[in-house]
């Protein structure tokens, strides 16, 4: 779930601090789900680690690889392929890149997982000129870091190629390794991004989270994961976990868009509600401010429709902090505004993991509620995260990116409501003690008192896999 693996993926693990464990854990999960998976290496793997696969094939013992591999996969589902074992060094060499590419094209192979780097058992490394050895057809690059290196000195005892790490991060030899330094290394084109083929997804794995205190974990989220997502468009998500434990991934941090639907004609009110006075601004501008006050939303898209030419100039003070999209088909229903937002996200410079859909006529939705929806999504990757107000479903709703295709199929004036039924068994719920936030539909609604949304827990399905 966390890596969002698709059929026919070629996944390359680089870096240090858990590559082999992550690769075999992923292979185990995929095989258990019925996939036919090949693990291999383009560098070297310890002989003892070859026993982690249910079947190990050596290139020097094969006469016709496609036939023998297909037969082994039919029995074991997971097959490791290496070169001949070197008994002196107790390692098995990897396979040539062209062999990896050929294996990935075989019709009976659902996924190929490659350990494409070496780190001499250190939790952190920077690649040399000849590293990593990443196949050109890699579709997913997973740079790995062992978080137990935090607070350690930049020395050979803790870091493979410390001089290269120093050059890429600005740390001095012997200086304490910080979260900022790890983020700088992972996001560097000569560091965590080195060897990434054009078009491949990049999902760093911050491993050994179990070695950190709760306070350190929060710092990791803020100083590594969020910094990488802000500064490195090539990175789609950042995983945090401990792949050697029963729950390998604790959080999957990705960009979450805020989408404000503001295209309607406000027929019941009889005037343009988006520009109604609200506190010291307008109703729409207040909702935008609330979205910007959230620590979790980026980018923020505002969808206009009815009288967009009048509303758009009033949004100028927000500048580049928001992206304004005009929906010319707004009169055909709310679904068309949802479509406009999804298409806009498809052209955004960096991929998003989810989107929170906010309504321009609900001014009482708080940044705290939005942040709670996003925090829940990070630990569950649920397709929808939904607030319930005194056991009544309400807005805003977070939609995971795997639902975007379903949203594009919705028609009429219903928004994403049909998906609540499609994914009814997979919803994650945030329980709120207060009544549903008011909709500003009539003049009387303007006089109603605000309805804050204190949170009271809810259902939470933790991720249980790295897949």
Image: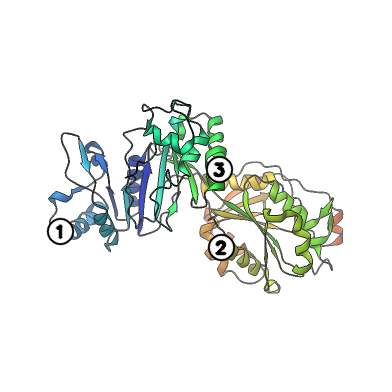
- Specify how the rendered protein is coloured: rainbow
Residues at marks 3 and 2 touching, judged by CB atoms closer than 8 Å:
no
- In the rendered structure, the answer to whether residue 317 lies left or right of residue 403 reads right
Label 2 residue SS: loop
- Identify the residue position indicated by label 3 in the image: 227
The residue that label 1 is drawn on is 64
Question: Label 1 crowding class (10 Å Cα cut-off): few <14, some 14-19, many 20+?
Answer: few
The secondary structure type at the circle numbered 3 is helix
**Mark 2, residues whose alpha carbon is within 10 Å: few (<14), some, or many (≥20)?**
few
Numbered label attached to residue 159: none
Splitting the image into 4 quarters, where does residue 163 fall? top left
Label pair 3/1, CB-CB below 8 angstroms: no
In the picture, measured across the screen, residue 351 lies left or right of residue 80, that is right
Q: Earlier in the sequence, mark 3 or mark 1?
A: 1
- Residue at image coords 68%, 73%: 328
Distance between mark 2 and mark 1 Cα atoms: 45 Å
Q: Position of residue 351 (x, y in %)?
A: 53, 56
Residue drawn at the location 71% of the way across and 44% of the way down: 433
Q: CA distance from mark 3 to mark 2?
A: 22 Å
Q: Nearer the viewer, residue 250 or 274?
A: 274
Which residue is tagged 2? 347
- Mark sitting earlier along the chain (3/2): 3
Position of 432 with respect to 98 (left or right) is: right
Which residue is at 28% across, 64% downward? 107
Residue 221: percent from the left, percent from the top?
54, 39
Residue 134: x and y, percent? 33, 50
Measure the C-alpha gap from mark 3 to mark 1. 48 Å
Q: Nearer the viewer, residue 70 or 392?
A: 70
């Amino acid at each position: 779930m966390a890596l969002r693996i698709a059929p026919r993926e070629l996944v390359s693990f680089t870096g240090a601090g858990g590559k082999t464990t992550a690769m075999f854990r992923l292979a185990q999960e995929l095989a258990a789900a019925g996939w036919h998976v090949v693990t291999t290496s383009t560098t070297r793997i310890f002989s003892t680690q070859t026993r982690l696969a249910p079947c190990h094939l050596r290139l020097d013992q094969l006469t016709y690889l496609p036939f023998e591999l297909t037969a082994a996969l039919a029995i074991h589902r997971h097959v490791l392929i290496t070169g001949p074992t070197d008994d002196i060094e107790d390692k098995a060499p990897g396979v040539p890149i062209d062999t990896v590419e050929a294996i990935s094209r075989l019709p009976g192979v659902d996924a190929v997982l490659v350990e494409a780097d070496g780190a001499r058992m250190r939790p952190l490394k920077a690649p040399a000129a000849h590293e990593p050895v990443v196949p050109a057809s890699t579709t997913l690059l997973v740079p790995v870091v062992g978080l137990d290196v935090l607070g350690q000195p930049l020395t050979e005892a803790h870091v493979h190629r410390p001089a290269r790490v120093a050059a890429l991060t600005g740390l001095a030899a012997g200086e304490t390794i910080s979260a900022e330094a790890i983020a700088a290394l992972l996001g560097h084109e000569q560091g965590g991004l080195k060897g990434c083929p054009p078009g491949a997804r990049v999902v760093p794995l911050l491993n050994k989270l179990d070695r950190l205190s709760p306070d350190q974990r929060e710092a990791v989220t803020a100083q590594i994961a969020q910094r990488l997502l802000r500064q490195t468009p090539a990175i789609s998500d950042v995983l945090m976990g401990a792949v050697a434990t029963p729950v390998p991934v604790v959080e999957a941090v990705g960009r979450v868009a805020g989408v404000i639907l503001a295209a309607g004609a406000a027929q019941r009110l009889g005037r343009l509600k988006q520009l109604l006075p609200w506190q010291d601004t307008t109703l729409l501008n207040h909702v935008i401010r609330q979205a910007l006050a959230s620590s979790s939303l980026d980018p923020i898209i505002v969808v206009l429709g009815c009288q967009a030419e009048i509303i758009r100039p009033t949004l100028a003070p927000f500048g580049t902090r928001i992206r304004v999209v005009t929906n010319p088909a707004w009169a055909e229903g709310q679904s068309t505004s949802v479509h406009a937002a999804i298409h806009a996200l498809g052209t955004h410079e960096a991929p998003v993991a989810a989107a929170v859909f906010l309504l321009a006529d609900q001014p009482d939705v708080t940044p705290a509620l939005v942040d709670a929806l996003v925090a829940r999504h990070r630990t569950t990757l649920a397709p929808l995260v939904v607030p319930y107000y005194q056991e009544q479903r309400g807005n805003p709703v977070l939609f995971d990116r795997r639902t975007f295709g379903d949203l594009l199929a919705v028609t009429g004036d219903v928004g994403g409501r049909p998906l609540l039924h499609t994914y009814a068994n997979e919803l994650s719920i945030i329980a709120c003690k207060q009544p549903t936030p008011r909709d500003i539909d009539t003049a009387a609604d303007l006089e109603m008192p605000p309805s804050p949304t204190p949170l009271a827990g809810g259902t939470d399905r933790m991720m249980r896999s790295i897949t």
